Image (spheres, rainbow, N blue to C red):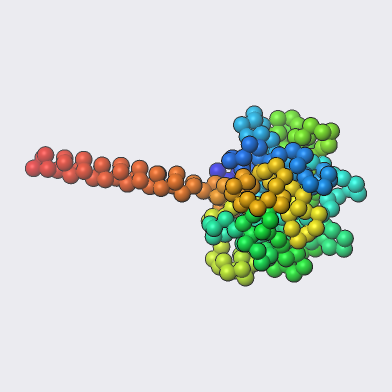
Amino acid sequence: MFLSGAVSAAFGVIPLNSPTTAWYAVPYAGAARTDFLNDQQTGINEADLVGSAVGAAALQTAFYFDFAGALVGFRVRVDGDSNPPGFTGAIWVGLMLDGNNSIDLFAGVIRKGPTSQIGFYNPGTGSNISPSTTSIVDGSPLYSEVISASNYLFTAVTVGPSGNDPVSGGTADIGGDGNTDYFATWVLPFSQLQASAAARGFSGVTSSTPIRFVVGTSEQSNSINQDLNGTSGNTTSTSTFATLGALSPTVTMGGGVVPEPSVLSYSLLALAFFYLSARRRKAFGRNSQA
């Protein structure tokens, strides 16, 4: 189900410092871990997405999202804060909007040199189905905002009932390397996601639209070259995101996980079977009374 405990839907605000229980944790259930530890390609802690092992008592994912009608929010968990303080580089969330497993739109954070912005961006001209075929058009965003205290927060993970991670099992250091993990959280207008998707040819995006995600970090803001969520390394792989385990389950902004087609088909067949069986029993009863 979609968790919305701390979201103030009446004001259309997603508090940047709200606990993880107010966000939807994307599980990456097909992978051995929600993300692998120490697999960033440049040795920079804050570029390393971190998640715990699938089946762990306190499962932690590296990627969260939230939706409050007016805003859509994204959150990633990384392995610490490097010098200088504050995230440096880029974080990318690729959105797949049409079910063909290619990235159709990017939501991202760029904090590199003079650029300090969040926004929605075009994918490059490649097929965008694998790390080696994916790039980002970072210089001309479809929509952008200058980073501010109202739309972006990079903060240390805190545990316990009053922390921003109250369900971690008591650890703010998933990797166990002595670095406190950090959350990077940013929010954008949902209307601009809709407009950016429409500019890409995907009109009519709503909170019920099925979406799959690819999440990664980069040193240069036109690619994913540091870490790729759900897989160990593989930032230059020619294998598809789906093959690598870097593709999220299908979700909606407003309702959580969408059943996979095989599960959905089975459920529909089961419902049809029970419906037809009930009709036959009812018809048999009428015939018996006659």
Count how many numbered circles sit on residues in the image. Answer: 0
Q: Nearer the viewer, residue 197 or 175?
A: 175
Residue at 84% from the left image edge and 58% from the top image edge: 112
Residue lying furthest front: 238
In the rendered image, residue 167, in percent from the top left (x then y), is placed at 68, 34
Q: Which of 43 and 85 is in front in this view?
A: 43
Image quadrant where one finds the N terminus:
top right
The reply, left or right, for residue 38 in relation to residue 237 is right
Q: Which of 241 and 70 is in front in this view?
A: 241
Image quadrant where one finds the C terminus:
top left
Q: Please say if 111 is above or below 243.
A: below
Residue at 58% from the left image edge and 69% from the top image edge: 201
Q: Nearer the viewer, residue 152 or 126?
A: 126
In the rendered image, residue 245, in percent from the top left (x then y), is placed at 62, 45
Quarter occupied by residue 90: bottom right
Residue lying furthest left: 290
